[in-house]
Amino acid sequence: MKKLWQLMLMAVLATFMLAACGTTDEPKKDETPATENTQTDTDDVVEAAFPVTLTDAVGNEITFDEAPKTIVSMMPSNTEILFALGLNEEIVGVNDYDNFPEEALEKEKIGGMEFNVEKIVSMQPDVVFAHESGLGSGEDGYQQIRDAGIKVFVVTNASNFDQTYTTIEQIGQATGKTEEAATIVEDMKAKVAEVVEKTSKVEDKKRVFIETSDAPDIYAPGKNTFMQEILDMIDAENVVTEEGWAVISPEEIVSQNPDVIIVMYSYVPDIIESVKNRDGFGDITAVKEDRVVQVDENLTSRTGPRLAQGLEEVAKAIYPEAFE
């Protein structure tokens, strides 16, 4: 059982590390991919039109002569976007870890970080939506798929809300779903505005600690991470001041004395009680006031349509009074 937990921990950490990739102060090249029908504002939506040429995360220009009829998705965030666009029938293969929506569980699995190239090629999809975060281990496989004559579109690893909106719009263009993509982005922006407005009225600003793995190696997001952006949006203070992702000792957490502790993993049974019972944690304000809260990690690590919901869930965990 301990070995199983360790394997699950590695998977969870990999997901969060991938979500945090590119979140440095250095600007990213071609942050808004070039297209023939470039759209950066959903108020001016370009009607679905083909052919359309899009530039993916690795700089490859890919021309879509028509909307793809068969699609393989290699990342959960891609899959959630594709389903939200209404492409259930077109999706023929998905990542092993895809679990939302429920329909994704019924699709053929093509592997995880180590995907089955032969299986993907045998499906002969019109396009494979890969992901920038998988380049380190998957580029050779991507090239094998290209060599088989199959389009591979590498989706940018979004590191904030704006880049997530752009990704959704771009996938919408590639699949002939520009109107649907615009609606998704508009709904997300409306939800974000609602959450920001509600939390702006809170007078008692909270100091927050967020952990994404259990002891002994407690990982937490610091500056220039997606979670830092979320905390900034709802005017909450992150007690972790290190850059990127850091391993934080239990003693340091006790020393920081956060008002709220957010647990963003689910591989440990009864994790809330486990956190509360750590040595010295009884003196932490969050434990004394029963403010140790578990939030679904998929809502904030998958940069897709549910990201605004993730923002709301984090906000409710920190400022429940704002949503009463």
Image (cartoon, helix red, strand yellow):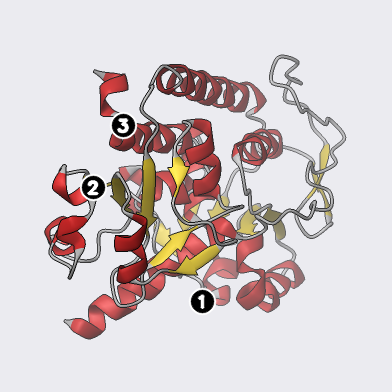
Horizontally, is 8 left or right of 30 in the view?
Answer: left
Q: CA distance from mark 3 to mark 1?
A: 36 Å
> N-terminal of the two: label 2 or label 3?
2
Q: Which residue is labeled 1 in the image?
A: 114
Q: Which residue is labeled 2 in the image?
A: 286
Nearest to the eye among marks 1 and 2: give it.
Answer: 2
Specify the quadrant of the image occupied by residue 236.
Answer: top left
Horizontally, is 114 left or right of 265 in the view?
Answer: right
Closest to the observer, 122 or 36? 36
Q: Position of residue 10 (x, y in %)?
A: 39, 75
Amino acid type, mark 3: Lys
Q: Is residue 64 above or below residue 283?
A: above
Q: Which residue is labeled 3 in the image?
A: 316
Nearest to the eye among marks 3 and 1: give it.
Answer: 3
| Residue 95 visible, this orientation | no
Q: Position of residue 232 (x, y in %)?
A: 53, 37
State the residue at coordinates (44%, 52%).
Answer: 239
Locate the C terminus by quadrant: top left
Q: Position of residue 306 (x, y in %)?
A: 44, 36
> N-terminal of the two: label 1 or label 2?
1
Locate the N terminus by quadrant: bottom left
